[in-house]
Amino acid sequence: MLAVAQRLLHVTYVWGGLSAYGIDCSGLVHLAWRRFGVLLPRDADDQAVATSPLALGAERPGDLYFFARPGRKIHHIGIVTAAPGGEQRRMLHACYRRRRVIEEALPAERTATLVGAHRV
């Protein structure tokens, strides 16, 4: 699944997008898993409900990171690309700020809103 999602690196971020012409964070996860016959809901908060929570630190490549601001519902999702080492976490995601799909270490503003890791 991760290899399928990585094929979408550099695709333009489009809110609600679900194709190689434009995609958003939850669309990236939905599309990558759908390729293998796994039907996840379309939106990040619903994807969190449909997957199994993990203890932070137990995640591995292909698992999912979920993000929310305090008191609010989940607003962002990324695919884990490397097992965490210390405080270093990496993910592939459709990044609104960078306007494309990227793979990166979680920046401080993402780490501050990380609310969990899940497995499909």
Image (cartoon, rainbow, N blue to C red):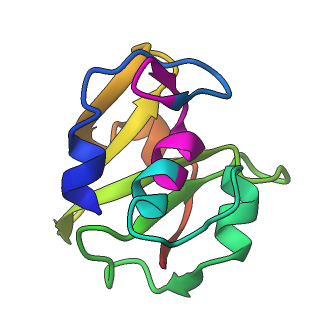
Q: Which residue corresponds to the image point at 34% horizontal and 36% vertical from the top-left?
A: 107
Kindly indicate the quadrant of the structure image that contains residue 20: top left
- In the rendered image, residue 58, in percent from the top left (x then y), is placed at 32, 85
Between 32 and 35, the one nearer to me in the picture: 35
Check residue 76 for magenta coloring.
no
Q: Tell me which segment is drawn in magenta.
A: 19-30
Seen at 52% across and 21% down, the residue is: 96
Residue at left offset 83%, top offset 49%: 72
Q: Residue at x 35, y 28 (%)?
A: 101
| Residue 38 or residue 112, whichever sits in front | 38
Image position, residue 112 (x, y; %)? 52, 47
What is the total number of numbered labels drawn onto the structure image?
0
Query: With respect to residue 68, does 17 lie above or below?
Result: above
Q: Quadrant of residue 33?
A: bottom left
Q: Nearer the viewer, residue 89 or 103?
A: 103
Q: Quadrant of the N terminus?
A: bottom left
Left or right, 79 with reference to 61: right
- Residue 89 seen in render: no
Q: Is residue 115 above or below residue 16?
A: below
Front residue of this view, candidates 77 and 35: 35
